[in-house]
């Protein structure tokens, strides 16, 4: 099924990413691995942890996916990422992710002016 294929694809990508990273101990071992294959409703979940501190878990169904990943960056900083994915897209959350700059004050003032001074409705010619 599609859910099983997506699960396998994500798991393989995660393992490839772990194996290719320069800062990761190449001799790391998998400490735990849990895999609950899709049930009749398409619900699944899996998780693993490695000896070098990588932890990954994910659960989902046809309505969406949620998951979390933790590891140590090349600079020695702990990285935690959680995410959801649904019909509206992929939604990652983590302190290490870049954030947009604040909205400039002049834009906020313009938006407030527009809100308080809505345009007049267009009049039809008769």
Image (cartoon, helix red, strand yellow):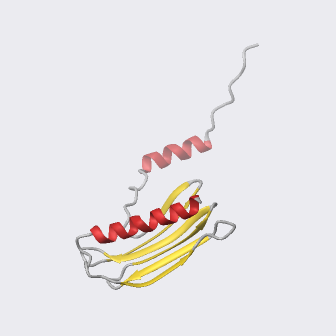
Q: Nearer the viewer, residue 14 or 81?
A: 14
Assign the N terminus to one quadrant of the image. bottom right
Q: Position of residue 126 (x, y in %)?
A: 76, 13
At 52% from the left and 61% from the top, the residue drawn is 5
- Left or right of residue 24, residue 48 in this image: right
User: What is the residue that sits farthest to the right in this orientation?
Assistant: 126
Q: Nearer the viewer, residue 125 or 72?
A: 72
Q: Residue at x 72, y 15 (%)?
A: 125
Q: Position of residue 85 (x, y in %)?
A: 54, 61
Report the residue that reaches farthest toward the top.
126
Q: Nearer the viewer, residue 62 or 12?
A: 12
Does residue 110 lie above or below 121 as drawn? below
Who's the residue at 51% across and 61% down the image?
6
State which quadrant residue 94 falls in: bottom left
Q: Give the answer, above or below, for where 25 lies relative to 93.
A: below
From the viewer's perspective, is residue 125 above or below residue 110? above
Could you say where residue 46 lies in the image, as x and y percent from the top left? 52, 75
Point 37% across, 70% down: residue: 15
* Image location of residue 21, percent across then percent down: 27, 69
Q: Taking 119 as reference, is 98 left or right?
A: left
Q: In the displayed structure, would residue 6 be above or below residue 73?
A: above
The quadrant in which residue 75 appears is bottom left
Q: Is residue 40 left or right of residue 91?
A: right
For the image, the number of numbered tags is 0
């Amino acid at each position: 099924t599609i859910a099983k294929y997506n699960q396998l694809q994500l798991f393989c990508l995660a393992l490839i990413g772990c194996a290719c990273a320069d800062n990761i101990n190449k001799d790391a071992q998998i400490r735990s691995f849990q895999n609950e294959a899709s049930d009749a409703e398409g619900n699944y979940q899996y998780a693993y942890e490695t000896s070098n501190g990588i932890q990954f878990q994910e659960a989902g169904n046809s309505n969406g996916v949620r998951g979390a990943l933790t590891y140590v960056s090349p600079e020695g900083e702990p990285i935690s990422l959680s995410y959801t994915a649904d019909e509206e897209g992929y939604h990652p959350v983590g302190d290490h992710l870049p954030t947009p700059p604040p909205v400039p004050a002049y834009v906020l003032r313009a938006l407030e002016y527009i809100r308080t001074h809505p345009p007049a409705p267009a009049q039809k010619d008769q």
